[in-house]
Image: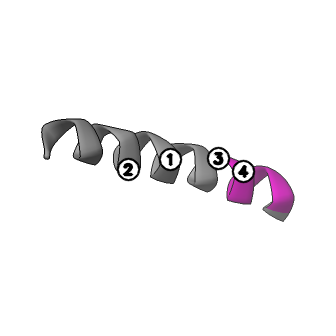
Amino acid sequence: MIDGNVLYGTFADQKSRLDAVLDG
């Protein structure tokens, strides 16, 4: 569970950064 949460958290963080870049 912990590993899954960390993995999801990392994915969400990267997606947020990507969205921020696309939003310019």
- Which residue corresponds to mark 3? 17
Q: Secondary structure at mark 3?
A: helix
**Residue 23 lies in what quarter of the image?**
bottom right
Q: Which type of secondary structure does the marked residue at label 2 adopt?
A: helix
In-front residue for pair 6/19 = 6
Relative side of 6 to 16, left or right: left
Quarter in which the C terminus is drawn: bottom right
Residue to which mark 2 is pinned: 8
Q: Which residues lie in the magenta part?
A: 17-22
The quadrant where residue 20 appears: bottom right
Label 1 vs label 4: CA separation? Answer: 10 Å
| Residue 24 seen by the camera | no
Q: Which residue is mark 1?
A: 11
Q: Main secondary structure of the magenta part?
A: helix
Label 2 Cα crowd, 10 Å radius (few <14 / some 14-19 / many 20+): few
Which residue appears at 48% of the width and 53% of the height? 12
Q: Amino acid at mark 3?
A: Arg
In the picture, the disc for residue 18 is 4
Mark 3 and mark 2 lie on one chain; the one further toward the N terminus is: 2
Which SS class for mark 4? helix
* 23 shown above or below 11: below
Q: Give the alpha-carbon distance from disc 1 to disc 2, as whole Å.
A: 5 Å
**Amino acid type at mark 2:** Tyr
- Amino acid type of disc 4? Leu
